[in-house]
Amino acid sequence: MQPANYDLYSTFVRRARRLWRQYGVLWLGAVAVGLVAVFYARLIDWGYNAFLHLQREHIWLPLILTPAVAAVSVWLTRTFFRGAEGSGIPQVIAVLHAKPGESGERLLTLRILAGKIAVSFLGILGGFTIGREGPTVQVGAALMFNMRRLYPRSNVLIERKLVLAGAAAGLSAAFNTPLAGIVFAIEELTRSFEARASGVVITTIIIAGVIALGLNGNYTYFGTIQIGSHFPDLLAVAVLLTAVVTGIAGGVFCWLLLNTARWIPAPLRKLHGDQPIAFAALCGFIIAVIGLVSGGTTFGSGYAEARGLLDGREHLSLAYPFLKMASMVGSYLPGIPGGIFAPSLSIGAGFGNALHMVFGSLELQMLIALAMVGYLAAVTQSPITSFVIVMEMINGHALVISLMATALIASRVSRLFAPPLYETLSQRYTAPPQPAAAPQAAAAADEAPADVPEPLRRNEPDSATANETSDR
């Protein structure tokens, strides 16, 4: 009788282990991603509210606080958290396109995860124009990547599956946009969607989304816009013009980030190479000045301004999108952790507000939605992800065709100016390391901001890079 019981017990243990490996690790990781995403969102919101409180009481404080925070943030990033700079999406792409085990050990460690959250929180305390959504992608990927330790024998397939699922779940939990998380995994991260990975990604997104909904409640990121059932005759013209305007603006932004050696004066490039902390402080001072000129509207991610425009509570100047874009470039150049999703949506909302002067017969909310998706698609050059994100954020199913057309046109216009931003930046993390015997080359590589790809960092012609990434 004992052998029969032993066999039954052994069978139960084997099946339990198999189920744990198939589902348990992923579900546990998804719960962790959802919890950390909610914690991170609340931390960033608290930090920005604290900055606003200080800025309202002491109007000139950003002239001191923002440069100081910039200097400390760059010192922390360069000293302790190399690999945490920027939005984090280029790092995730680099891991997925290389050997996840080797590159993940450099770019998806728990130390980088902690640094991503801590330094971006410090940045938002200083009023930097950064978002939390891109960093949440790297945070989610890092969490899931480190879950591989719970497998008795990990391999490349398991590691890639974990990174992909964590990144997609991070975006989904950050925006409360589950469909966008799935599309993001297909369009931006992998360019494919294998049957073996689809169920894993979808399940992880669902679980992380349920955790976020349970803690935050059922909400749409920008609320629900009210669009009438009758679309005006000028809608097609508005879609075309909005797509062209936002496509040019987004393309110029990408060009500025990818071609710093062409437009940043040589003394400033030398300052960045020799004294990166001083360069960061200078960028912080410029961000503070722009913030004061704009009346404080360019500080932070821009979520409040975009939400206010959609709700009809906010009235912004026509210069807002240009000032916000300048502040966004200044926030990204020093190389501290911070995303560009939310600031891009805010800039797009500003362009929609400006275009309402041309299309006064169209509803302002409609133009803002079109411009948001246009600018986001131009910056990321991921049109499907962009229109799905905006559609879910505003509950704008009535505008699906218009949003899709705007995203596709804007993305194509942007590509005339620059190759895909995230893919090009990811090349920096997949390039072979510099030989130790070449200190001059290594020093030259530090002359440009941290998230600039290697060919541009060495001030070499970037035509090869552009050609390699032009057909995405």
Image: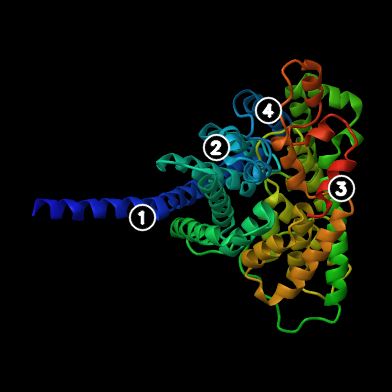
* Residue labelled with disc 2: 113
**In the rendered structure, which amino acid carries the disc numbered 4?**
Val
Tag nearer the camera, 4 or 1? 1
Front-lying residue, 443 or 373: 443
Classify 10 Å Cα crowding around label 4: few (below 14), some (14-19), many (20 and above).
many
* Residue labelled with disc 3: 467
**In the rendered structure, which amino acid carries the disc numbered 2?**
Leu
Asked whether the residues under the numbered discs 4 and 3 touch, taking CB atoms below 8 Å apart as contact, a structural biologist would say no
Q: Tell me which residue sits at (41%, 55%) in the image.
A: 23
Q: Is residue 323 visible to us here?
A: no
For marks 2 and 4, give the CA distance. Answer: 16 Å
Q: Is residue 315 left or right of residue 122?
A: right
Residue 299: which disc? none
Is residue 44 placed above or below 379 in the rendered structure?
above
Sequence-wise, the earlier of marks 3 and 1 is: 1
Sequence-wise, the earlier of marks 1 and 2 is: 1
Tag nearer the camera, 2 or 3? 3
Front-lying residue, 369 or 92: 92
Sequence-wise, the earlier of marks 4 and 1 is: 1
Residue 74: which disc? 4
* Residue labelled with disc 1: 19
Classify 10 Å Cα crowding around label 3: few (below 14), some (14-19), many (20 and above).
few
Front-lying residue, 444 or 393: 444
Q: Quadrant of residue 84?
A: top right
Q: Is residue 95 left or right of residue 299?
A: left
Classify 10 Å Cα crowding around label 2: few (below 14), some (14-19), many (20 and above).
many
- Asked which secondary structure carries label 4, the reply is helix
Q: Tell me which residue sits at (59%, 53%) in the image.
A: 171
Q: Is residue 291 left or right of residue 104?
A: right
Sequence-wise, the earlier of marks 4 and 3 is: 4
**In the rendered structure, which amino acid carries the disc numbered 3?**
Asn
